[in-house]
Image (spheres, helix red, strand yellow):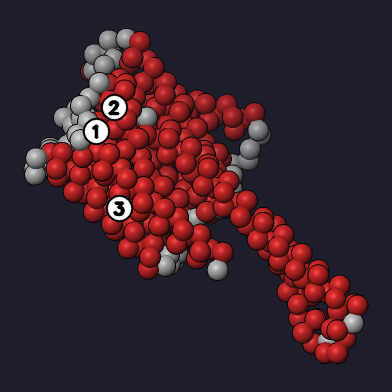
Amino acid sequence: MKADDSAIPHSTIAVAASTAGPAAESPAGSTTRTATGTAGSTTRTTAGSANRGGVVLAGLGVVAFSLTFPSTAWGLESFGPWSLVALRTLLAAAIAGAVLMAGRVPVPDRRHRPGLLVVAAGVVVGFPLLTTLALQTSTTSHAAVVVGLLPLTTAVFSSLRTGARPPRAFWVAALAGAAVVIAFTVQQSGGALSGGDLYLFGALLVCAAGYTEGGRLAGIMPGWQVVGWALIVSLPLAVAGAAIALPLEPVRLTAHGVIGLVWVAAGSTFLGLYVWYRGMAEIGVPRASQLQLAQPMLTLVWSFLVLGEKVSTAAPVAAIAVLVCIAVTQRAGRARRTG
């Protein structure tokens, strides 16, 4: 809002200078031009700072998300897939509830509740459940590259939902990044998709819808409140899920299992989504979504370092190509927003 407030006196002064005629050459006119230039410079500086801050926040979200699959693999050492997702949501909702109560945050307006339901269904429940089921048959590295299609999927959802129209260069780079991810996935799997890929493709759709709606809401209310209320909305389902799943799925507590559960709940679900939605609110959903092109490659690194999975020699080549695509989408998105 600050940029808009400064733009009002800027426009007013500019119009006054243009209609003053000869007076524009007077010392007063000189002052007018100086004020105009200062206001414009301040506006650009503020917008540039907001852009950089938004990129940093969204980038931190990507780093948090990149640890989700390795952490889930650790969690599955101790819990069944349904139990893990239910407990993940319960723990994250407990954190969110404590933060909301401490901040004495009022219940969202009724008009925002359908959007929060979409966020809850897509990001809090749907994506974790589908990807956890997929990781029973897929490696984390394979799942990571398939989910690398999420940036393009999110950009398409955002364009349809919010009417955002990124420039052509953005879409060309986004499609190129998606093509790299698809080629890498096919190469990794030997030309055939695994059984867990159906879960992963379903996860793409529900998560993209949740990201899009959450990014829109984060422009209305603070991002941490979007995450918090979406978790609270999911709490009854999580309680029911835990009550049903825990007696049916064996629990074998290990250090890895507990660490994995804590991270996917506190790190990925709460803190990761908090900075992610704040970043999307500042730089826009399409542009932020393309930062996630780096997520599969980061997950490959964690899979190698944390889980000891073998990483294909094609990974560095794909990583460089994806990073180039990210640079182009960020440049195109920044040019559209500042233009």
Q: Can residue 9 be seen? A: yes
Give the mark, 1 or 3, whose residue is nearer the N terminus. 1
Residue 274, given in percent of the width and then of the height, sits at 51, 38
Q: CA distance from mark 1 to mark 2?
A: 6 Å
Secondary structure of residue under mark 1: helix
- Numbered mark located on residue 269 in the image: none
Number of dots carrying numbers: 3
Residue 215, given in percent of the width and then of the height, sits at 48, 50
Do callouts 1 and 2 mark residues in contact (Cβ within 8 Å)? yes
Residue where numbered disc 1 is placed = 141
- Numbered mark located on residue 303 in the image: 2
Q: Nearer the viewer, residue 302 or 78?
A: 302
Q: Residue at x 79, y 87 (%)?
A: 19
Dot 2 crowding, Cα within 10 Å, few <14, some 14–19, many 20+: many
Q: Amino acid at mark 2?
A: Ser
Q: Quadrant of the C terminus?
A: bottom right
Q: Amino acid at mark 1?
A: Ser
